[in-house]
Amino acid sequence: MFKYKIIDNFLNEDDFIKLNSIKLDEISQNSIKIYHNEIDRDNKIITNSLDQEIIKGLHKNYHAKAFKILEELNYEKSQLYEYSDFTIIKTGKNYRFPIHDDTPNKILSGVIYLSPKINTGTILYDDKQGNNKHTIEWKRNRSLFFSRRERESWHSYEGNNISDRIALVYNLMTTQIKKVYEIEKKSYILGNLRWRLNPHLYNYFKLYF
């Protein structure tokens, strides 16, 4: 299975409380709501759906921490960093996202579990067929980070059929996609084509691609 890093109590108490106090829209049990935000290395907001000061505060408080994790997991990709993505994702209790390996512009993929107290964490697999399933246990303020690899970093997530699931997705990003494939020693042409021919995942990730 691919390398990953788990850190409990990733957010400080003030930020954890602040994020959990944000009023999010009600959703149906099978739907998803995305609150997408991006900020560059110079602290300039690229796009936001939350208060800009919240995004700037998260970038200030956690960039060094996340970047160090990226250096540990994939130093070469750390040289490609351009901007950060802070996205709150709320999914209904019966929502399921399919097995995938993340888009190549995510040089570090991260998630911090916000609420509720009990839900389903991230599910990791050896392959796209779902073999050797391993679930990272859901725990509030627990983070999971990994640096994706084409057709290797297979994972998914889903609700627990009891309550909505709210998480902060924290990704370090790049636009240098060809260099990502060079580092991974994978085909840029085939990889790019694969993502664009997968309508479900491409539609979900098109904000990032």
Image (cartoon, grey):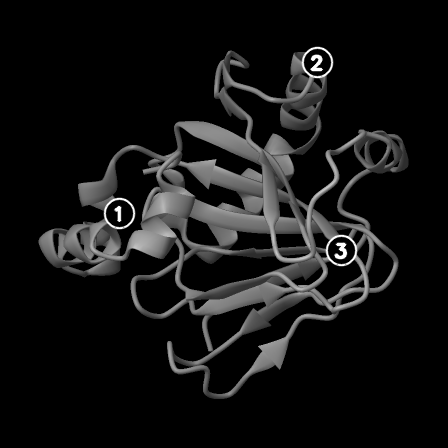
| For marks 1 and 2 on the same chain, the one whose residue lies earlier in the sequence | 2
Label for residue 142? 3
Toward the viewer: 86 or 60?
86
Q: Report the amino acid beneath label 1.
A: Val
User: What residue sits 48% from the left and 20% below the top?
Assistant: 41
- Whole-angstrom CA distance, mark 1 to mark 3, is 27 Å
**Mark 1, secondary structure of its residue:** helix
**Please, is residue 197 above or below residue 50 in the view?**
below
Q: Are marks 1 and 3 in contact (CB under 8 Å)?
A: no
Q: Report the amino acid beneath label 3.
A: Arg
Callout 1 crowding tier (Cα within 10 Å): few <14, some 14–19, many ≥20? many
Label for residue 180? 1
Q: Would you identify the image quadrant in which residue 126 lies?
A: bottom left
Q: Would you identify the image quadrant in which residue 17 lies?
A: top right
Q: Is residue 3 visible?
A: no
Residue 102: % across, % down: 40, 55
Residue 161: % across, % down: 75, 69
Tell me the mark number nearer the camera, choosing from 1 and 2: 2
Residue at the far bottom in the pictured view: 132
Residue 179: % across, % down: 21, 43
Label for residue 53? 2
User: What residue sits 76% from the left and 55% below the top?
Assistant: 142
Callout 3 crowding tier (Cα within 10 Å): few <14, some 14–19, many ≥20? some
